[in-house]
Amino acid sequence: MHLQDIFIAGTSTTADAMAWTMAEILNHPAIFKRVRQEIHDLTNGSGNNRLVEETDIPNLHYLQAVVKEALRLHPPVMAAPRVCREACRVGGFDIPKGVAVALNVYSITRDPDVWENPDEFSPERFLQGMVEKGFQANGFAAFGGGRRMCPGSNLAFTVICYAVAAMVQCFDWKVGNGEDGVRMEAGLGMTMSLAKPLVCLPLLQVCLDQFQMEASSL
């Protein structure tokens, strides 16, 4: 694998995951408000207002659930290539040793036998005993699985959570192009991205004004 491949894989997929997460919460205002409230409760303890930090992520459980649910519905890579180390039989088909196969990650993460209402965006499902299972929970294959799962899964997940938290904490967002909500059609390509780029206009909130005033007075 070339260094360029690693760089592209680590940036494009992470950016796509951020876009899908923001698109989902913008289409679900109640979830957006709950994420913001969780951040507010954590960063405004004892009357000390502050911006969210990367070290806060482990304590933002609902935010983590939101990002995991977005990754479940919209896995950055829809198919994971593998090579059979030995002959096996899968779904009634004989797979010889050394044959390349592609695991349909998109279908796994929307399997109705594993997920209740699989096409519904419901972060609460990850608050019901699945958060502790991390990325190895049955049916959650956004980062692959086993010994061949994405080596940068923890880093990517932290970056996505932190970026989304920063965008939610002090900004309201208005969907651009005069549309009421974000269109959720997926585009064509090696990675799963929105068919149309996510265009949103940030609306500054009071909390950020306070931080700016405090910083200017130092």
Image (cartoon, rainbow, N blue to C red):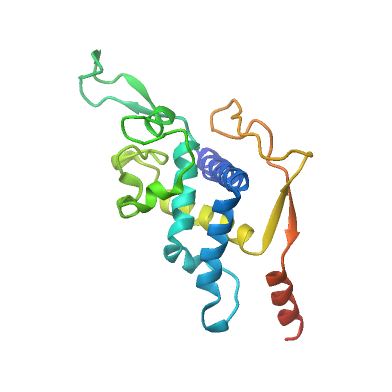
Task: Identify which residue is drawn at 51% across, 79% down.
Answer: 45
Looking at this view, is 152 or 127 the one in front? 127
Residue 111, image x, y percentages = 36, 30
Residue 152 visible somewhere in the drawing: no
Residue 92, image x, y percentages = 23, 13
- Left or right: 51 with respect to 109? right
State how many labels appear. Answer: 0
- Left or right: 62 with respect to 13? left
Residue that protrudes farthest toward the right in the picture: 178
Residue that protrudes farthest toward the front in the picture: 30
Residue 53 visible somewhere in the drawing: yes
Task: Identify which residue is drawn at 61% across, 43% down.
Answer: 27
Task: Identify which residue is drawn at 38% across, 38% down.
Answer: 141
Looking at this view, is 60 or 98 the one in front? 60
- Left or right: 31 with respect to 93? right
Residue 195, image x, y percentages = 64, 30
- Left or right: 85 with respect to 82? left
Task: Identify which residue is drawn at 50% across, 71% down.
Answer: 42
For the N terminus, the quadrant is top left
Q: In which quarter of the image is residue 216?
A: bottom right
Residue that protrudes farthest toward the top in the picture: 93
Q: In this view, does 195 lie above or below 17?
A: above
Residue 160, image x, y percentages = 53, 52
Q: In which quarter of the image is residue 218?
A: bottom right
Q: In this view, does 165 lie above or below 56?
A: above
